[in-house]
Amino acid sequence: MDGADLIAAGARAIASLGPATSRLEADSQERADAARAVDRGHFTPEEDERVRAWFARYLTARSGLLETIDDLRPIIDGEGVDPATHLRAFAIAFTAACQLVRGGRFLVADFAAHKLVQRKLNEAEPRFRIPRKQYTAVRRALTSPVNAWRLHQALRFAEEHRADIDGLAGDPEMAVVLAHLREAEDALRVDVRHLVKARLRYRWHSIRRRRATAVQHVMFALAEGFGRVVADLRNPLHVKRLHGDARRALDELLQPGDVLVSRHDDAVSNLFLPGFWPHASLHVGTAAHRRQLGVAVDEERARRWSGPRRVLEARKDGVRFRALDDTLAVDAVAVIRPKLSRDQIARALSQAITHEGKLYNFDFDFFTADRLVCTEVVYRAYDGIGSLKFQLKRRGGRLTLSAEDILDMAVDDLGFEPVAVFGSESCHDTLVTGPETAAALASSYRSMQP
C-alpha cells in the first residue's frame, strides 16, 4: 500500500480499536470474576474461562495497536515524506501508543493488581495460542525506560505541533482518530517518580516470578536496552509458504461464494483467536463473476469491487474488498464451498457486500451489526440461505463462531464441502484436492481440539 492507503487503513483501525479498548476496561463481569477469585483464593472453571477470554481479547486489541504503529513506521521514519502526510501518520500512531499505555495501566493497576490474577494471566493457554508470561511481558513493556523515553519524545512532539494536529479534525476520518486521542492521551502524562516506582515494582515482580539463568539475564538486558515500542511483531524475513504452483492452482479452483480459511505462522492479527485456523474470508469473485451471477450491488461498492479485488475480508482496518494475492499471502489455507444454487449464492453475496466498509469488531460480539469480525462476514452472508444454519457456540460467556466452527460444517457435510487444503502438518507444502481433502482438513485441526 502507498502512504495514503496506509494512513486510511490506520485511521480505520483506530476507529475499531478505540471503542474496543475502552469496553475492555468497562467489562464488569470479568472484573467481578477476578475479585471473587481473589476473595476465595482460586478461580472456578467458569470464572477461569471468562477471564482467559477477556485476556485474549485484550491481547488481540493490543496486537492490533502494535501492528498499526508498525504499519505506519515507514512513513514516520522515512525520508522525503511531506509534512502533512507525516503529521497524519504520527497522529494515528501516537493515538495507538496512548491507547497501549492506557490499556496496559488498566491491566496492571486495576484488573490484575493481585498476584493471584497475575499468575492466572501468566499461564499458557494453548486454545488461544497464548504463551506463558504474557502478563509479565505487558508489564515489562509498560515500565521499560526505553519505551518511556520514546513515548516522552512523542508526547513532546505532539505538544509542539498541537495546533497542526487539532487542525486535522476537519477530515472526518482523522476526526475519529483525534477523538480517541483526547480520551487516551493523559495516560502518557506521568512524572518521573511514578515511572521509577513502577519500574521498581516490576523488578520485584520479575524477581519473584522468574528464575533466570545468567544467559537469560543478559538477553533480558539486551532486549530492554535495544527494545522498541513495537516488538516481536513479524519476522521480516519470513516467506509465506503458499506460492508458486499451489497458488496458481488455487486461483483456478476458486469460485464465487467459496470460503477461505487461513493461517499466518507469524501473524499478529488474530493471534489470540482459538485453533490452528483462526481467520476466514469470503471469495466474491471478479466483476465479471458479479455480472454473470446477477449480484445486486450499488454503484459505489461496484467501483471498489474491481480489478484484482476478489475477496471480502474483515481485518483490523475493517470489512474491505481485497486483492486475492493479498488474502492468499498466507502459510496455510483451506477452501470450502457452499452446497447452494447459483441464485442462492448470488443472494448470499448480495447480502454480504452490504457490510463492506464497516469497522472490525474487536469485541467479537456477533449481535452488533455495525462492526464485524472475520467469521461474521461468512455468517451474515449464508445464515438462513437454503438449508445453511450456523450454530454459534458459547465461549468465555458470549456466543461466537470460530473459523474452525465453519470448517466443521464442511468436514461433517452440513451445507459446505471441502475443496482444497494447503499448509497443515499432513500437507505442509502440498495442495490437497479431491476425495482426500476432507480427511486432510479434519486432521489439520481436530486432533488439537479439547
Image (spheres, helix red, strand yellow):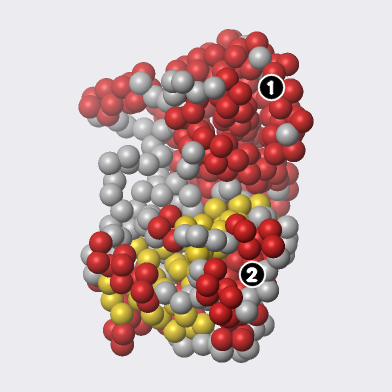
Earlier-in-chain disc, 2 versus 1: 1
Q: Position of residue 133 (x, y in %)?
A: 42, 40
| Residues packed near mark 2 inside 10 Å, few (<14), some (14 to 19) or many (20 plus) | many
Q: What residue is shown at x 46% (from left), y 51% (from top)?
A: 271
Mark 1 crowd level (few <14, some 14–19, many ≥20, 10 Å Cα):
some
Eyeballing the image, is 26 above or below 385?
above
Regarding mark 1 in the picture, which secondary structure is present there? helix
| Residue at 31% across, 80% down | 433
Give the quadrant of the C terminus: bottom left
Classify 399 as above or below 126. Answer: below
Three-letter amino acid code at disc 2?
A: Ala
Distance Cα–Cα, label 2 vs label 1 = 37 Å
- Residue visible at 33% across and 58% down in the picture: 331
Is residue 432 or residue 411 the one in the foreground?
Answer: 432
Question: Looking at the image, do the residues carrying marks 2 and 1 touch, with CB atoms under 8 Å apart?
Answer: no
Residue situated in front as seen by the camera: 255 or 64: 255
Q: Is residue 276 left or right of residue 215?
A: right
Quarter of image, res 198? top right
According to the image, label 2 marks what residue? 352
Query: What x and y, as percent, mark residue 192?
Result: 58, 10
Point 50% across, 23% down: residue: 81
Badge 1 amino acid: Ile
Residue 8 visible, this orientation: yes
Q: Is residue 118 visible?
A: no
* In front of the other: 351 or 316: 351
Residue that sits furthest to the right in the current view: 170
Image mark for residue 165: 1
| Residue 201 relative to residue 438: left or right | right
The label shown at residue 203 is: none
